[in-house]
Image: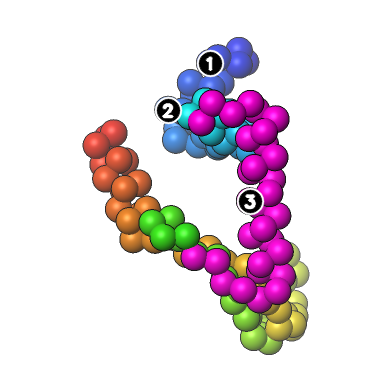
Amino acid sequence: MDSLITAKLYIAMGTTTTTKADLVNAIAQKTGLTKYETESVVDAFFESVIDSLKTGKRIEIRGFGSFNIRHKNLRDARNPRSGEKVTVEPKDVPVFKISKEFKHAVSESLKSNT
């Protein structure tokens, strides 16, 4: 299938994905930084988020959302293939909670596009 047709099909279906490279390109255009400089900034941001979460710190970005660690308790589950009961060990998982402003901005934008 022609890549242009595929891209149009994905856009029409609403299944597009923004990649890290797309973010770097958009930020570079808006800031005037080179793509190399922008990629360094984006990488540093991701590393900072990961490092903070590794130390148990919560990250809050006003108007965007917050990153946190959530503890999941020991629980029983089922293997979907075999139906066998399995025990899922307790674990800590990173979570992201979107801010009200972010949620409102996106939902309003999507309403106006339909």
The amino acid type, in three-letter code, at marker 1 is Ile
* Residue 49 image point, x, y percent: 64, 60
Please indicate, yes or no, whether residue 10 appears anywhere in the rendered image.
no
Q: Which residues are magenta?
A: 31-60
* Residue 82 image point, x, y percent: 75, 69
Instruction: Say which label, 1 or 2, has the lower sequence index.
Output: 1
**What whole-number distance in Å separates the C-alpha atoms at marks 2 and 3?**
32 Å
96 or 66, which is in the foreground?
A: 66
Question: Residue 5 got which mark?
Answer: 1
- Closer to the camera: disc 2 or disc 3? 3
Question: Residue 45 got which mark?
Answer: 3
* Residue 63 image point, x, y percent: 38, 56
Asked if the residue at tag 1 contacts the one at tag 3, i.e. Cβ–Cβ closer than 8 Å, the answer is no
Report whether 57 appears left or right of 62: right
Residue 56's place in the image compared with 111, above or below, is below
Question: On the image, numbered disc 2 is attached to which residue?
Answer: 12
Tell me if mark 2 has few (under 14), some (14-19) or many (20+) residues whose alpha carbon lies within 10 angstroms of its own. few
Q: What is the secondary structure assignment of the residue under circle 1? A: helix
